[in-house]
Image: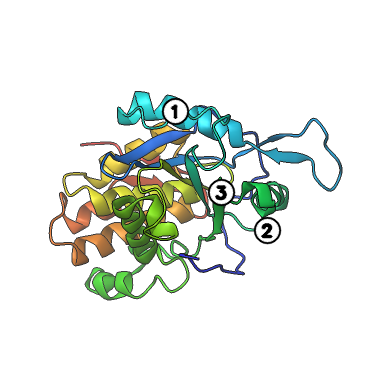
């Protein structure tokens, strides 16, 4: 498995699973050389017509394929997922690498539905679930730390959330394609959907995707990154995730060879209530 699993309860906005939202499903990037698309969403589940107390939800597999097709065309200008109807011979449809940032403490039902789907033998060739819960990097905002300590702190705070290494792994998958998950003998042209999500698709998803964008686009400013997060979710990430974005912004400033911003911009793109909600900062 490319990513490690973490049995760790994370702090953040507690949210129960809600049905996969068309409005929160977005194409973030697409590599035409490898047919890999990085997407974001909320928890990809749907109410189950055969619901029970133990399993009230089911996995939204067909909806993921439909939305990857729609948003791939409209947002990433690609038709790589155009035939993703879910009716192709097994092994020919897009492969889904689901990266869940959630944990059992705040959304047991959603994860149960996802785990149950991917545990079925008949879904082995359809995709994989990778659980990588995050949520501790933003507990202390940069504003509480002396500026001369920012570089040191930003480089040493990723033992749990591991945003830098996880972004590197997503980049590696995007560059190498489907075959990188298994072996070079596999079909390297098979479309690969990398779906990153938490529960609501706003806080931890915004943290991961915002960091991913800063790391991969040297022309992007922190304010532009945050504006994309707000637009794609419908609200800003909460204080914990916004502060984590501030820290990654600082980390990226000190470790990247080229960035499109100054380090002070990393604490100027949002204003947050302590332990509460945030808003994009007003531009002067």
Q: Residue furthest left?
A: 258
Instruction: Tell whether label 2 touches label 1 (CB within 8 Å).
Output: no
**Between disc 1 and disc 2, whose residue precedes?**
1
**Between disc 2 and disc 3, whose residue precedes?**
2
Quarter occupied by residue 137: bottom left
Crowd rating for badge 1 (residues with CA inside 10 Å; few <14, some 14–19, many 20+): many
For label 1, the residue is: 69
For label 2, the residue is: 104
Judged left or right of residue 239, residue 184 is left
Distance (Cα) linking label 2 and label 3: 25 Å
Q: Position of residue 63 (x, y in %)?
A: 57, 30
- Kindly identify the residue that appears in the image at 31 percent across and 45 percent down: 34
Point out which mark residue 125 bears. 3
- Identify which residue, 27 or 146, lies in the foreground: 27
Judged left or right of residue 13, residue 150 is left
- Identify which residue, 280 or 22, lies in the foreground: 22
Q: Position of residue 177 (x, y in %)?
A: 35, 50
Crowd rating for badge 2 (residues with CA inside 10 Å; few <14, some 14–19, many 20+): some
- Identify which residue, 237 or 124, lies in the foreground: 124
**Is residue 19 visible in this depiction of the protein?**
yes
Q: Is residue 253 depicted above or below 45 in this figure?
A: below
Distance (Cα) linking label 3 and label 1: 19 Å
Q: Secondary structure at mark 1?
A: helix
Foreground mark, 2 or 3, reads 3
Q: Secondary structure at mark 2?
A: loop
Q: Is residue 251 depicted above or below 61 in this figure?
A: below
Colour scheme shown: rainbow
Q: Residue furthest front?
A: 185
- Kindly identify the residue that appears in the image at 80 percent across and 45 percent down: 55
Q: Secondary structure at mark 3?
A: loop
**Is residue 111 visible in this depiction of the protein?**
no
């Amino acid at each position: 498995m490319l990513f490690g699993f973490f049995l760790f309860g994370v702090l953040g906005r507690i949210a129960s699973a809600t049905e996969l939202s068309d409005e929160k499903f977005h194409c973030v990037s697409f590599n035409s050389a490898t047919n890999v698309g990085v997407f974001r969403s909320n928890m990809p589940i749907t109410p189950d017509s055969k619901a029970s107390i133990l399993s009230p939800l089911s996995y939204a597999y067909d909806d993921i394929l439909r939305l990857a097709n729609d948003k791939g065309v409209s947002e990433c200008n690609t038709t790589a997922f155009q035939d993703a109807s879910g009716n192709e011979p097994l092994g020919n449809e897009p492969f889904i690498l689901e990266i869940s940032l959630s944990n059992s403490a705040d959304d047991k039902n959603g994860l149960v539905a996802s785990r149950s789907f991917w545990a079925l033998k008949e879904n082995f060739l359809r995709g994989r679930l990778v659980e990588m819960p995050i949520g501790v990097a933003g507990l202390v905002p940069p504003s509480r730390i002396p500026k001369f300590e920012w570089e040191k702190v930003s480089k040493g705070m990723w033992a749990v959330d591991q945003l830098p290494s996880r972004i590197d792994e997503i980049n590696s998958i995007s560059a190498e394609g489907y075959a990188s998950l298994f072996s070079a003998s596999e079909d390297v042209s098979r479309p690969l959907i990398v779906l990153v999500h938490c529960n609501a698709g706003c806080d931890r998803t915004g943290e991961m995707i915002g960091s991913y964008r800063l790391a991969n686009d040297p022309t992007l400013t922190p304010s532009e990154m945050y504006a994309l997060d707000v637009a794609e979710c419908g609200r800003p990430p909460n204080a914990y995730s916004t502060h984590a974005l501030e820290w990654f912004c600082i980390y990226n400033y000190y470790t990247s060879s080229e960035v499109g911003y100054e380090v002070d911009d990393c604490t100027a793109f949002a204003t947050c209530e302590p332990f509460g909600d945030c808003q994009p900062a007003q531009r002067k």
